[in-house]
Image (cartoon, rainbow, N blue to C red):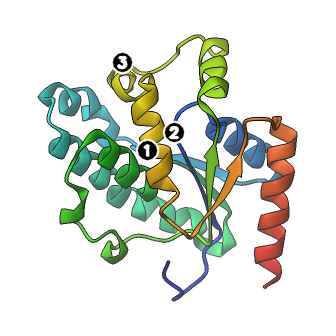
Amino acid sequence: MKNEKQYNIIVLEGVDCVGKTTLAKKLESELGFQYLYTPQPPIASIRKEVESVNDLQTRFFYYLTSVIAVQPLLHAMTANNGLVIIDRYIYSTFAMHKAMGAKVKCVNMRQLPILWPHIGILLTADRETRRQRRMIRGENIVACDQRIEQTDNWLDLAQEIYKTYKELTIIDTSSLDINQVYEKVYELFMEKRRK
């Protein structure tokens, strides 16, 4: 992570059904974080077309572009010490696509012209917990995400790839409710802000 300037950015990374969006929404309502996800409009409008190409490298570069394209918005959101919570960011782009078989090493992630979070959190959950959560939420997964989000082997592999990013703090949500996860993140956030 770059140390040029500290931004009030927390990223939540992880595979589907680990609690990222639920936690992000709680941070938004409890602490006043601004919620952000990628891809954002107008880049999001071509998502289905990119998926229809059915090429992993094209998909990887589309999601990478979506992270870069959100930078002006992220700069504006962090102006005047604005707090931002990002639901999947650069680590997801690399981990998920590497798990799918894309050649992500062709891009040096650390050299990208992006704002880096001052707190990166990897939420994990065991396979059975993810399955139960997926059933509870009613399989409400965007069609283009179904091939990876419902394939346990890919999700397990992606979760292991995420763990190689040592700057991410891992929180296993398998046996925790949202309030317990929130408390862990809140404590981490307050600790980092005091430094």
Determine which of the numbered discs, if any, sits on residue 15 in the image.
2
Q: Quadrant of residue 100?
A: top left
Q: Secondary structure at mark 3?
A: helix
Mark 3 surroundings within 10 Å by alpha-carbon count, few (fewer than 14), some (14 through 19), many (20 or more):
few
Q: Which mark is residue 158?
A: 1
Sort mark 2 into few (<14), some (14-19) or many (20+) by Cα contacts within 10 Å: many
Dot placed on the residue nearer the N-terminal end, 2 or 1: 2
Cα–Cα gap, marks 2 and 1? 7 Å
Q: Earlier in the sequence, mark 2 or mark 3?
A: 2
Q: Secondary structure at mark 2?
A: loop
Q: Nearer the viewer, residue 147 or 20?
A: 147
Q: Check contact, mark 2 vs mark 1: CB within 8 A.
A: yes
Residue 82 visible in the displayed image: yes
- Mark nearer the N terminus (3 vs 1): 3
Circle 3 residue: 143
| In this rendering, the label closer to the viewer, 2 or 1 | 1
- Return the x and y of residue 7 as percentages of the image width and height: 60, 74
